[in-house]
Image: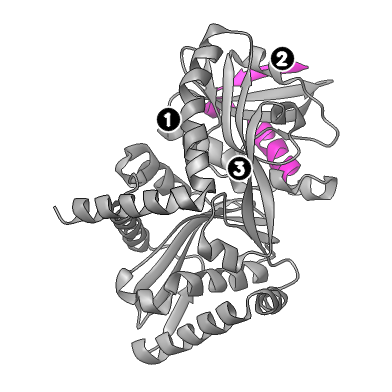
Amino acid sequence: MDISVYRPGELSAADRAAWTAMQSKAHLHGAPGLANPFLSPEFTLAMGRVRRGVRIAVVREDGEPAAYFPFHRSTAGVGRAVGLGVSDAQGLVHRPGFVWDARELMRACGLAVWEFDHLVEGQEPFEAGASGTFPSPVMDVDQGYETYLGQLRAQSPKFTRTTLAKERKLGRDAGGVRYVHDERDPAALATLMAWKSAQYRRTGRSDRFAHEWITRLVHQLFHTRSEPFAGILSVLYADDKPIAAHFGLRTERVLACWFPAYDPAFSKYSPGLILHLRMAEAAAADGIAYLDLGRGQKEYKDSLKTRELTVSEGWVTRRHPVAVGHRARRAPVRALRNVVLSRPELFEPADRLLKRMGHFRSNR
């Protein structure tokens, strides 16, 4: 393999086009996960503008691009997936039939270890280092919205009936409901981010938007628009007032759900669920194959999903003291978190404690 490593700004237009072409054809070659927006060059380039250490390895065979591997590297040689912690799809984007040696790639990238938490399916050389696999629910709309809704009615009749009834009641009570699939007003984005920050604090979670680089990243992607990629802000209005919103990323075939939130004053109408159904309808009309709801067990995801993808977390390591030390620090924390999340008898008390802490913090 001929491997060259670039900073994001050094990537040529030809390489960006080749990378995008690999993504657009991935579903035809049995690797649909590679079409996820978090694996797009646009996401990596945006990350490079807000975080130091972002790099892209370009693998060529016979002078032609065969694969693109975005990663984040520290000065000590610790590697992480680009956007680790906020990215819902990670891995190497490659042409059909490409086979790679994970440790040879890491050596060329100057990495002692590469950590991932949302590795997409079909990345066998990396999967050898996986410590766990997790479901990532999706909403299939490739056969059209009515087909999706029919499947939803069959698998969750009460949920579907109740949600649609709440939408009708919202329209009656609020003087009309309006949905904008691709809202370009920055004020609407600011409203969403304020709702989401309040939700994080209310539930005792870490506020992602308290990190300047995440806020900058979202703004970068909100203003990123090309034929194969865009940041999409979707907003549900009641009487011309925003009551629910979502910001995500789309490629030609995938809408990756990312930051959903709503105005708690309208919670009795389940505006977040109504919003997701409207998103599904608009995405189907745009030719999107599925909405990826992302890793994580949530009741609303279980209600909306049609099936599940699988993502993995873990490490690829070389024989290096830096790799040993990094894994020794990270492995116990990850293992404990996953045990708590997977066992209701542990998760529910922990969740209640976080919410009590959030309530205290919000009322200080």
How far is mark 1 from mark 3, CA to CA?
A: 18 Å
Rendered image: mark on residue 89: 3
Q: Of marks 3 and 2, which one's residue comes earlier in the chain?
A: 3
Q: Residue at the location (66% across, 79% down)?
A: 153
Residue 38 left/right relative to 105: left
Quadrant of image for the N terminus: top right
Q: In the rendered view, would you say 319 is above or below 334?
A: above
Residue 25 visible somewhere in the drawing: no
Residue 86 falls within the magenta-colored stretch: no
Residue 65 left/right relative to 207: right
Q: In the rendered view, would you say 211 is above or below 181?
A: above
**Residue where numbered disc 2 is placed:** 104
Residue 54 left/right relative to 15: left
Look at the image and give the residue range highlighted in magenta: 1-23
Q: Residue at the location (43% across, 74% down)?
A: 271
Element marked by disc 1: loop
Tell which residue pokes out farthest to the front in this image.
345
Check disc 2 and give the amino acid type: Glu
In the image shown, does 298 or 274 lie closer to the viewer? 298
In the image shown, does 9 or 279 lie closer to the viewer? 279
**Residue where numbered disc 1 is placed:** 51
Residue 3 falls within the magenta-colored stretch: yes
What is the x, y in percent for residue 136? 62, 51
